[in-house]
Amino acid sequence: MAGAVAAVLGLLLLLGSPGASTGPPRDSLREELLLSPLPSGDLAATFQFRARWDSELHREGVSHYRLFPKALGQLISKYLVRELHLSLTQGFWRTRTWGQPYLQAPAGAELWVWFQDSVTDVDKAWKELSNILSGIFCASLNFIDSTNTVTPTASFKPLGLANVTDHHLLRYAVLPREVVCTENLTPWKKLLPCGSKAGLAVLLKAERLFHSSYHSQAVHIRPICRDASCLSVSWELRQTLTVVFDTFSIGQGKRDWSLFKMFSRTITEACPLASESKIYVDISSKTQENELLEVTPLPLSVHEASVQGDRRTYAVYDLLSPSLFNVSRSLNVQLKWKRPQDSLDLSTPVLHAQRYVSGYGLQTGEISTLIYNTHPYRAFPVILLETVPWYLRLYVHTLVITTKGKENKPSYIHYQPAQDRRRPHLLEMLIQLPANSVTKITIQFERALLKWTEYTPDPNHGFYVSPSVLSALVPSVIAMKAEDAEQSPLFTSLFPSSDGSSYFVRLYTEPLLVNLPTPDFSMPYNVICLTCTVVAVCYGSFYNLLTRTFHVEEPSRGGLAKRLANIIRKVRGVPPL
Amino acid sequence: MAAALPAPRWLPAAAALLWACCGLAATDGIQDQAEQFFRSGHTNNWAVLVCTSRFWFNYRHVANTLSVYRSVKRLGIPDSHIVLMLADDMACNPRNPKPATVFSHKNMELNVYGDDVEVDYRSYEVTVENFLRVLTGRIPPSTPRSKRLLSDDRSNILIYMTGHGGNGFLKFQDSEEITNVELADAFEQMWQKRRYNELLFIIDTCQGASMYERFYSPNIMALASSQVGEDSLSHQPDLGIGVHLMDRYTFYVLEFLEEIHPASQTNMNDLFQVCPRSLCVSTPGHRTDLFHRDPQNVLITDFFGSVRKVEITTQTVALDPNLVGLETRVPSDEMATEPLKYAEQLPVAQIIHQKPKQKDWHPPGGFILGLWALIIMVFFKTYGIKHMKYIF
């Protein structure tokens, strides 16, 4: 039998050799950790793991997966996905105090997918895709159905290569109630080629990651240019994880931090399968005249980049360079602040937003969104996408947009009203934000009554309204040159940049929590008891009246007890029974 | 030491006889062990672990389920064969002072949540309907594999349920309940479809014994933490976390299971003795009349561990080290001739002049058709049929 197997293998080799002259498609892995102190004193750590695969997934029959995970590769080829973005987030990114995020995600679970144009039934593919992803990531993504899925018409343009952008191939859904915990992190880590055993992923321990102010993990799959000429397509899988640690709880009051304090681990080696493994530490404050901070161990090189309209300096630690682990076997990057910083770098971000619900009672309410443009002299447009569930009935005639006291008419509005139990409201507007202004958008709504079985088991918690999405091209102060995507750090190549004068940013507002009028769920039991009692009493009495006959009964002489009692009564002088 | 005495002639024969007896006894022992290995007749193990309670003060039910999950994983059942249903999230609950942990002992000694946990049914997905669908296998077609119970007729299944219960029912998430009759019928459906070989049902709720009273399918063994009319009590609170961490019965079962390793020979009778009345305050009960084997011969690892039948072969297969990946390559003349480009993220001009999407034409619905039919009928009734030629 062994001989036959060897013969078969030999035959396959002979048959396969003319076609296999170029070898299997190349794939590469880059991993990167960016540590940036935030203006408010917290620390943000962004992990990015990028697997790039030079293969045409849709046209070839792929059978060998190396660095690209098989679960996702099969998903892309089966459902003809062009782009997939899934994020699971716990917490909220406070843009006003923390600055502009590199890649923000809304609280809960967010999934948006662009399909290929050869897909015949997009809704069916979307439903099956969300079910499969719920199994892969242990999240309740199977709750994504037509009541929370929308098709945006102007936001969420593809982030990868695209020649046709027909928006009916796009689906977007948010589940704000989704909880993110270790069971979502475990399968995310298992998609990495090195797992959590080597490289930067050893720092990802759940007990430290979830004890934070913001935790967001995401998976982004998109097609990118294979080389500068951009004639063929490679597939890119980016796994990003952003954590914001509160330095006051980990540093015991001081603003110093180190890898060990944050993650309770240090790095001992790079992932052997990675072609690049680097740590970037944002030391932009160091470039001022007085040295404010000190980073140990001393970085081997320093990288300057213009990111989000700002020129920043980064200390680089290359884990693949042999000189890094010469002194000690483990790498523990530490940052100490030389002087206590009383006036922090509190530059407010150019664009930030806020959303809240107002009103009283359980019948009506109002959703207000405030968008701030703090740029001193430039105005820019922003697209606002709002998805409101069907049980909050929006009154579009009450939509008011005011800037600096005057009405601001949007250049483009797309409104799709809700259908009860079938489709949510979709409101998309392109609004021009004047320089140095606050724009207020208000819309009133009315709460609907749900059916008894549609309430969740904890209805008094409230119902969530998904965060609204703001997409804007923010003008940058300095001119940014377009860098080669392969040479620059991963955190600069998230969004494809078109020109150097502005950068694209996508912000999310807070999710809202509204109370719907909740019935008393014990009422069915009460009603049954009362009705049965009333029916029993009435019917029983009526039946007795109709069917019972009365006849006279001879009084009996009484038993022994009665006679004895009568004797005693006669002695007492009381009339007998 | 020189042999001074000459050995008696019968000594070698006696030694040979003794050795033969010992050999026979030894082979008997080996045969016994081999027999025991094949006695139970199952080839794979599954576990369905359900916690049915929501809200922070029911922390102990989640800790119960996770400690059984931990033991079952430690003894060999892989995640792909475990269906774990947790009705609420305690580990990342905002009230948890130590996030991503669920403790079972006070002073936070044992974190049963761990770093490698896969919860299949979370939060609102834990309903009576989903539970019964998992058991009977009647699941919508797009359900992922990790949410299915893909057992066959040679599977031993462990079903563990915990939560709040009463006489004849178990409460799911404070909004619905499952009765003992429904559960018994579900098990009968499983038996009819040959979805299990043997089933062990453990329940840790108040009046738990009422839940197994109605079983009528063969090969089921059941354990409960309390009899009808008794309450199952919780073990100990932790002042740091602020809630009770475990129920007594599952606490002592966990202590018992910590002693078990994949090769241990402990049998079910020892499990029945766990948590006597002095420790548990309630009286644990069990039911074995539907089980065809004697509990003395049933190993704990028959249900809590995982059977891996290993076949050792002496044949070798030579692998060619020069074998390259066999894939069809796209012929290079099919590649694009002009460069592809990225989409513009915010094409303002294009958005403003975007034409609204043409709505698909739908035939008019019943109401509209009925309304028009009524209008036309009224019209012709009043004015007569001669106007028809002016309409059509």
Image: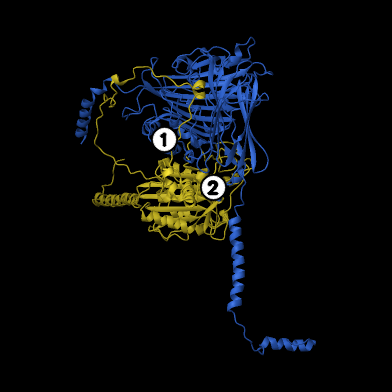
Chain seen in blue = A
B22, above or below A190, in the image: below
Display coloring: by chain
Which of the 4 image quarters holds residue A439? Answer: top right
* Residue plotted at (46% across, 42% down): B120
Q: Secondary structure at mark 1?
A: helix
Q: Is residue B270 left or right of residue A411?
A: left
Q: Chain of mark 1?
A: A
Residue closer to the observer: A360 or A354: A360
The yellow-tinted chain is: B
From this viewpoint, is residue B160 visible? no
Identify the amino acid type marked 2.
Glu
Subunit ID for the residue under disc 2: A
From the viewer's perspective, is B19 left or right of B134? left
Residue B192 image offset from top left, x and y in percent = 36, 56
From the top left corner, tell me how far across and down residue A186 is, in percent.
47, 34
The amino acid on which the numbered mark 1 sits, given as a three-letter code, is Val
User: In the picture shown, does residue B360 fall above or below A573?
Assistant: above
Residue that mark 2 sits on: A454
Residue corresponding to mark 1:
A122
> Residue A23 location in percent, x, y?
29, 21
Percent x, y of residue A251: 62, 25
Q: Secondary structure at mark 2?
A: helix
Q: CA distance from mark 2 to mark 1?
A: 27 Å
Left-right relation of B289 to A376 = left
Residue A108 visible, this angle: yes
- Closer to the N terminus: mark 2 or mark 1? 1
Q: Residues within 10 Å of mark 2 (few under 14, many from 20)?
A: few
